[in-house]
Amino acid sequence: MTRILITGAAVLGGEVRDIAIEDGRFVDAVTDPDHVVDASGLVALPGLVDLHTHLREPGREDAETVLTGSQAAARGGYTVVHAMANTAPVADSAGVVEQVWSLGREAGWTQVVPIGAVTVGQEGTQLAELGAMARSRAGVRIFSDDGHCVSDPLLMRRALEYVKSFDGIIAQHAQDPRLTEGAQMNEGVVSAELGLAGWPAVAEEAIIARDILLAEHVGSRLHVCHLSTKGSVDLVRWAKSRGVAVTAEVTPHHLLLTDELVRTYDPVYKVNPPLRTQEDVEAVRAGLADGTIDIVGTDHAPHPAEHKCCEWTAAAMGMVGMETALQVVVEAMKDHDFGWSDVARVMSTRPAEISGLSDHGTLAAGTGANLVLVDPAAAETIVPEDHATMGRNNPFRGLSVGSRIVHTFLYGHRVVADGALTTAHPISTGGGAWID
């Protein structure tokens, strides 16, 4: 039995107190601790939870693996990541989601929760094995065709109806395919000046509006992935005022970057949904601050260098972000009276609640000792080459940030110490707890 005492941490940026861990769980106090960690000057938050991560394995190990993605997550303060289904083969069956689940347990740096595809092969024509994935060892509860919109309204309705039986969630990639054919960037002044095919805001908003009405009609749970426009924020706010069971996420890059960056023609700024206008950025920041947008999801999307180091129109869409997400959120929200308790709410507590992870998102005694310690006064410059992810397509290269992940604990096991991965390897048990 291992006893750990963390001393002097500012819990959620407030009260300075000790944090006690025994046998991988938070407890009220410990005597004769085996390890004492001095956290003076550091902020203690529940381990971060990401509902939107692309780990690429199986099939695209040239871009990322579950191991490298898990290590990147740990360095970013994440103790849970949800792996999207657009692998090769697609995670549309119990066999594939169990493979991803097993790879996560073998890696051991963070808890990996698979997301199942809504449709077979993400092709949008036939429902995938939703029930079988839910009953599998992976226990899938969130389903998404992310990267592809479930554009058929009847199929979307059937999916919402199906997952309602086990309190599942459909996480929609809101992109009307006909309105975005050939689109390269946000539709607006910049796209007109650059002569690039535009991606109109209404292509996102029309799907969100339709799905809100379907979710209300069926009485099921809808999650809006990577919301990016002012109109989308207004729609989610309206839906919540009606009591619709809708939740929404925003990415770090949509909180900070705008389509003006596309003028550089640097494909690192090519992403789906595209970077929007400053007005949209201000709207999503306000929506995150007031709770209309529930969470931050990284949409961590690594690509091999050859898929980004090319001309704009040929480049892949996507950005990496797990290792820098907390720092970027703090920078983006610093003018919105957004404290550390708010950071914990949108990056840990609320995503854990949405996913039904009772062992995460909290520092309460008896729950899993999943914890991140942050230096709130660090001065650091983002250097993608220093990161654990295989992807170097980080749009925040060279950004100066004022915080740093110092330690990450996964069920009481310190997987990151002083900003670096530890050499020890956490091992999971069949019961879901993690031990040395």
Image (spheres, helix red, strand yellow):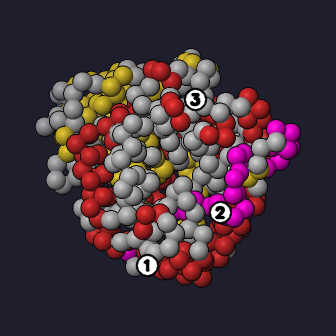
**Residue 177's mark?**
2
Spatial CA span between label 3 and label 2: 26 Å
Label 2 crowd (10 A; few <14 / some 14-19 / many >=20)? some
Q: x and y percent of residue 31 in the render?
A: 19, 32
Label 1 crowd (10 A; few <14 / some 14-19 / many >=20)? some
13 to the left or right of 153 = left
Residue located beneath label 3 in the image: 309
Q: Earlier in the sequence, mark 3 or mark 1?
A: 1
Q: Taking 108 as reference, is 362 above or below it? A: below
Residue 420 is one of the magenta-drawn residues: no
Q: Amino acid at mark 2?
A: Pro
**Residue 162's mark?**
1
Q: Amino acid at mark 1?
A: Tyr
431 to the left or right of 39 = left
The image quadrant that residue 419 belongs to is top left
Mark 1 element type? helix
Q: Earlier in the sequence, mark 3 or mark 2?
A: 2
